[in-house]
Image (cartoon, rainbow, N blue to C red):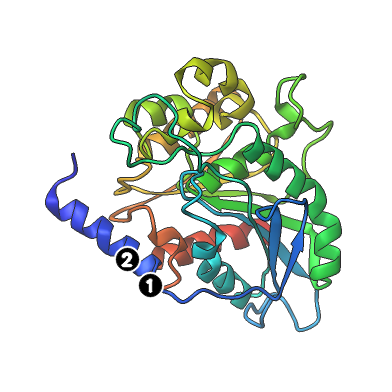
Amino acid sequence: MPDDAAAARAAAEEESAFSHPPVDPDATAAYGDHPDQVIDFYAPRPGRDSAPPGSPAPLVVLLHGGAWRARYDRRHLTPFAGHLARQGFAVASVEYRRGGGPPVPGPGTDDGDVPPAGRWPDTFDDVAAAMDALPALAREALPQADPRRTVLSGHSAGGHLALWAAARHVLPADAPWRTDSPAELRGVVALAPIADFEVAEELGACAHASLQLLGGPEHFAGRRPYADPALLLPTGIATTVVQGRADLVVPPRVAEAYAEAAAKAGEMVGLTLLADVGHFPLIDPAADACAVATEEIAQLAW
């Protein structure tokens, strides 16, 4: 259990991250018929010296976190999306279906207070469909964007989805989301991702959200090869993980385990560990950690 000081700091960080007013997108487009199958687009604002006015802007695709649970939608990530747009990036923020039905049996649901995480296979269906539809939708909504300089990023559960979306070409052959070739990405920047399901479950990350995402204990082992980024390596796509050392929500051991799995698969994953930083400063425009996350994105995009 965290000590009182660590818990208080984590609470203050969360309060700060959620204190910013939402930033409305410049456009929204649907990639399916469900209300959650939409993408918000933010046009780049002047900001970076390396992007002269009128020149194409790199495209950052964002996937929000919230343990794949319905109570958290893309709205809480809009300040970060707006921040990236002010740095001169074009931004596409993806919504997707999340868990909201009866609790899934297993750890983390005994008290009845924790809603289920994600939907199998709907959450994965949506992210795959959004990524497939994105190039055409972005051409329409963000003509300023340069699709050749696309960086995929996400926070927490969204960090997992970003890593997963970049690994669809190494999914098992019978996976419905598998692609024939890698996504055309400059790279992936995963922020405090749930990147190794085995370690995440050992640590009880997000009230055992990864167990619930896969449908409970009876499905966990069989579905992991289709969903766990630590089993979908190497991708051949430049990948950086940014992680707070003081993260109580997704402990740094999860990110470290993913980087170790990548190394064993012959792939180098960048791992930036930030001292005295918890889970939410990475997406909080008021926090220094957010500037680090932004710079990691810029390093791949520009």
Task: Say few, some or many: other residues with alpha carbon within 10 Å of mark 1 (under 14 / 14 to 19 / 20 or more).
Answer: few
Q: What x and y, as percent, mark residue 193?
A: 48, 43
Q: What x and y, as percent, mark residue 21?
A: 46, 77
- The residue indicated by pointer 2 is 15
The residue positioned 75% from the left and 48% from the top of the image is 131
The amino acid on which the numbered mark 2 sits, given as a three-letter code, is Glu
- The residue indicated by pointer 1 is 19
The amino acid on which the numbered mark 1 sits, given as a three-letter code, is Ser
| Viewer-nearest residue: 59 or 107 | 107
Numbered marks: total: 2
The image quarter containing residue 282 is bottom left
Task: Say few, some or many: other residues with alpha carbon within 10 Å of mark 2 (under 14 / 14 to 19 / 20 or more).
Answer: few
Q: What x and y, as percent, mark residue 153?
A: 60, 53
Q: Is residue 270 left or right of 43 when viewed as pictured?
A: left
What is the spatial separation of the Cα atoms under label 1 and label 2, in whole angstroms? 6 Å
The residue positioned 32% from the left and 66% from the top of the image is 15
Q: What x and y, as percent, mark residue 209?
A: 44, 36
Q: Secondary structure at mark 2?
A: helix
**208, above or below 298, in the image:** above
The quadrant the N terminus occupies is top left
Task: Give yes or no for contact between labels 1 and 2 (Cβ–Cβ under 8 Å).
Answer: yes
The quadrant the C terminus occupies is bottom right
Asked whether residue 302 appears in the rendered view, the answer is no
Q: Is residue 14 left or right of 88 when viewed as pictured?
A: left
Q: Is residue 295 left or right of 135 when viewed as pictured?
A: left
Asked whether residue 154 appears in the rendered view, the answer is yes
Q: Is residue 143 left or right of 107 when viewed as pictured?
A: right
| Viewer-nearest residue: 216 or 201 | 216
**42, above or below 237, in the image:** below
The residue positioned 58% from the left and 67% from the top of the image is 81
Q: Secondary structure at mark 1?
A: loop
